[in-house]
Structures are given as structure tokens and as C-alpha cells.
Amino acid sequence: MDMFDLSAARTKINEEYRQNKHVTELSSIEELVKFAQSVEEELKSSVIQAREVKPGTYELRINPETRKLDNIPGSLCK
């Protein structure tokens, strides 16, 4: 993750924390944690990091958690 995205993510996490720091009910806290975990899982499985290694050529960082879908033209049209 590049520094801009990392900073933006950190800012968003801190903003969400501040918006919910008043929550004291256990069930509400559990729901917030559950939501945070689902967001983490979505990011882990759907965001791919890439860096340009030479003009027009990129190196991808694909983790075991990365969701891989078939990329067959027309396969979604059936």
C-alpha cells in the first residue's frame, strides 16, 4: 500500500473511532467490531497492490487471501 493510501486508511479508521467512542453497550460494540472485521476481509480479498517496474509493466502483489475470479469475456452475460 502506498503512503497516500495508508494515510487515508489511517485517517478513516481514526474518524470512525472518534464517531463511535461513546458507544458503551456490549452488543453495539460487538457489531462495530464485526463490521470492521468484514471490511478488513473485503480489503484483504479484493485490493491488489501494483507497482510499475518499468514503463507499462507492473508487478502485482497477490496474497493467498486475494479473491480470484474468472476473466472470460461474455461469461457474465449468460
Image (cartoon, rainbow, N blue to C red):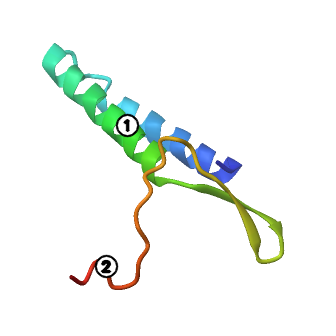
Characterize the local packing of mark 2: few (<14), some (14-19) or many (20 or more) Cα atoms within 10 angstroms: few
Q: Residue at x 43, y 52 (%)?
A: 67
Instruction: Say left or right for 8 vs 24.
Output: right
Position of residue 9 measured from the top left corner of the image (x, y, whole percent): 52, 44
Q: Could one spot residue 63 in this view of the protein?
A: yes
Residue that mark 1 sits on: 16
Instruction: Say left or right for 31 vs 4.
Output: left
Q: Amino acid at mark 1?
A: Glu
Q: Secondary structure at mark 1?
A: helix
Circles 1 and 2, Cβ within 8 Å, touching? The answer is: no
Task: Please identify the quadrant where the C terminus is shown.
Answer: bottom left
Position of residue 37 measured from the top left corner of the image (x, y, whole percent): 34, 32
Q: Is residue 34 above or below residue 44?
A: above
- Image disc number at residue 24: none
Position of residue 6 measured from the top left corner of the image (x, y, whole percent): 61, 44
Q: Nearer the viewer, residue 22 or 11?
A: 11
Q: Residue at x 56, y 44 (%)?
A: 63
Residue that mark 2 sits on: 75
**Residue 54's quadrant in the figure?**
bottom right
